[in-house]
């Protein structure tokens, strides 16, 4: 078993160290991750500049690109064969509801899924400093074992959010659907020391709808949340609606 580990918080983040350590239980581990924080990079791919790779130590590669670049580099260049599983994380911060569309952590799993490789994104649901990454990594190991033994449909990958708790305090995993945030849409504007305006997107944590069955609902109650995702963004309901319009 060969497991590739990546993230969007950068190769030096505590979450990727805990995840790589836990994955050793399953087999050989290769880490290919951005050389710095690339959170909210989404599914972006570097096409107009070269990429450089630095082997920090055996099996740990830092890439000066996005999480999606890392998955490409790992699978098409650095690893001798396609890995059996790609895991991304453990992100420092939740990836719930609409977050998945911005998340580099989730996009890395998405990219592996596009290449036909089983993939899981893991996030620790806190914005504060946390001591619980190794507990979260134990949850990740359990989820990875289930994916390996039960197999996912080929168009499906998992988005897993883990409560910021010691293992003993976490509640069992719930299978959830993607929830909804209610955005406040705030942009902070200030003036820099040279008198020029600058802007900063998002000043506070956006709120969410606490609807039963969603990822938010599970995490809010200290359950591990497991959401199966796929890349077909078609709104199947609307196919019928639009078919009735005259274009
Ligand atoms: Mn991140």
Image: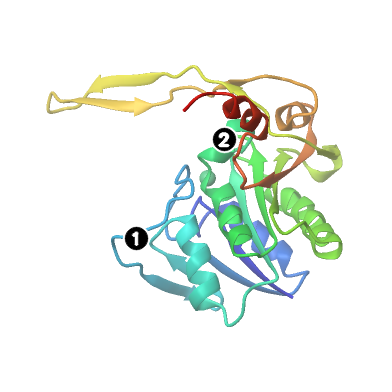
Nearest to the observer: residue 244 or residue 38: 244
Q: Quadrant of residue 4?
A: bottom right
- Which numbered dot is residue 36? none
Helix, strand or loop under label 2? helix
* Residue 104 located left or right of residue 163: left
* Residue 2 located left or right of residue 172: left
> Would you call the spot at circle 2 few (<14 residues within 10 Å), some (14-19), or many (20 or more)?
some
Q: Residue at x 69, y 52 (%)?
A: 157
Work out whether 58 lies above or below 140. Answer: below
Quarter occupied by the N terminus: bottom right
Residue 202 in percent (x, y) is at 43, 25
Q: Tell me if residue 93 can be seen.
A: yes
Of pointers 1 and 2, the one earlier in the residue sequence: 1
> Would you call the spot at circle 1 few (<14 residues within 10 Å), some (14-19), or many (20 or more)?
few
Q: Residue at x 41, y 56 (%)?
A: 45
Instruction: Give me the C-alpha separation between circle 1 and circle 2.
Output: 24 Å
* Residue 47 located left or right of residue 77: left
CB under 8 Å between discs 1 and 2: no
- Which numbered dot is residue 99? 2
């Amino acid at each position: 078993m060969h497991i590739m580990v990546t993230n969007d918080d950068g190769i030096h983040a505590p979450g990727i160290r805990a995840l790589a350590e836990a994955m050793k239980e399953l087999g050989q581990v290769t880490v290919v991750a951005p050389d710095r924080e690339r959170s909210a990079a989404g599914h972006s791919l570097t096409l107009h500049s070269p990429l450089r790779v630095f082997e920090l130590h055996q099996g740990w590669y830092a890439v000066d690109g996005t999480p999606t670049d890392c998955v490409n580099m790992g699978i098409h260049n650095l690893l001798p064969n396609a890995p059996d599983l790609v895991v991304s994380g453990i992100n420092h911060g939740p990836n719930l509801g609409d977050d998945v569309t911005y998340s580099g952590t989730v996009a890395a799993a998405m990219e592996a899924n596009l290449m036909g490789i089983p993939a899981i994104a893991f996030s620790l649901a806190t914005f504060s400093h946390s001591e619980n990454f190794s507990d979260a990594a134990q949850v990740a190991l359990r989820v990875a074992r289930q994916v390996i033994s039960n197999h996912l449909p080929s168009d499906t990958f998992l988005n897993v959010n883990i409560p910021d708790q010691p293992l003993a305090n976490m509640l069992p995993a719930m299978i959830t659907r993607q929830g909804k945030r209610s955005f406040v849409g705030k942009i902070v504007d200030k003036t820099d020391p040279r008198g020029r305006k600058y802007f900063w997107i998002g000043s506070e944590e956006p709120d969410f709808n606490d609807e039963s069955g969603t990822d938010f609902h599970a995490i809010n109650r200290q359950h591990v949340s497991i959401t199966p995702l796929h890349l077909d963004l078609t709104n199947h309901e609307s196919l019928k609606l639009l078919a009735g319009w005259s274009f």
